[in-house]
Amino acid sequence: MKIILLILLGIFSISYANESYYKNGKLVELKSSYSSRSFDSSSIKYYKTLGGNKVGVKNQLLVQCREGINCLKLLNTFNLSNYSKISDKIFVVNITNSNNVFSVSRALFESKDVVFAHPNFIKAKRKR
């Protein structure tokens, strides 16, 4: 019985492996994408959080390294060379394949050298 439970848990975690990120140190899982749009050769994929919020994801990450960490060296360690600096501590990193956005953000966060690393989210339009 334990083996079956472990197998099911493994399958479940693999199925969500590419659709989660860390927010405030906690793993946030997303429901699979349900539509996408393209603008100027960049694609936006839409997801829903388990709480029902709609979010759009491009092929970009926002990354802030911890104090004393050479962020440029860290990004190069992860083979991330297409980035721009938006402040002294925060970088926008372009990912070549938008399907890797979640796995790259989790790997950066789990390295313990960053304050945050998450997709550059696009929120859904709301009527006022």
Image (spheres, rainbow, N blue to C red):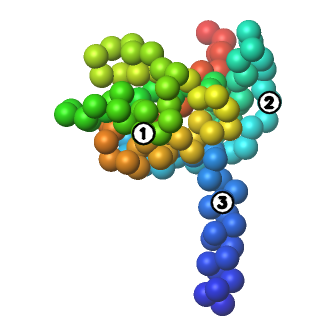
The amino acid type of the residue labelled 2 equals Ser
Q: Residue at x 64, y 28 (%)?
A: 96
Q: Is residue 50 visible?
A: no
In terms of secondary structure, where does tag 3 sit?
Answer: helix
> In terms of sequence position, does the residue under pointer 2 or pointer 1 come before the other?
2
> In terms of sequence position, does the residue under pointer 3 or pointer 2 come before the other?
3
In the rendered image, which quarter is residue 12 located in? bottom right
Disc ID at residue 1: none
Task: Give coordinates of residue 122: x percent, y percent.
Answer: 60, 21
Disc ID at residue 77: 1
The amino acid type of the residue labelled 1 equals Thr
**In this rendering, would 19 be left or right of 33?**
left
Q: Residue at x 35, y 32 (%)?
A: 73
Q: Residue at x 78, y 26 (%)?
A: 36
Proximity of marks 2 and 1: CB atoms separated by less than 8 Å: no
Task: Give coordinates of residue 28: x percent, y percent.
Answer: 52, 46
Question: On the image, numbered disc 3 is attached to which residue?
Answer: 14
Q: Is residue 17 visible?
A: yes
Between circles 2 and 1, the one closer to the viewer is 1
Task: Give coordinates of residue 43: x percent, y percent.
Answer: 73, 22
Location of the N terminus (image quadrant): bottom right
Task: Give coordinates of residue 62: x percent, y percent.
Answer: 46, 26
Question: On the image, numbered disc 2 is attached to which residue?
Answer: 35
The amino acid type of the residue labelled 3 equals Ile
Between circles 3 and 2, the one closer to the viewer is 3
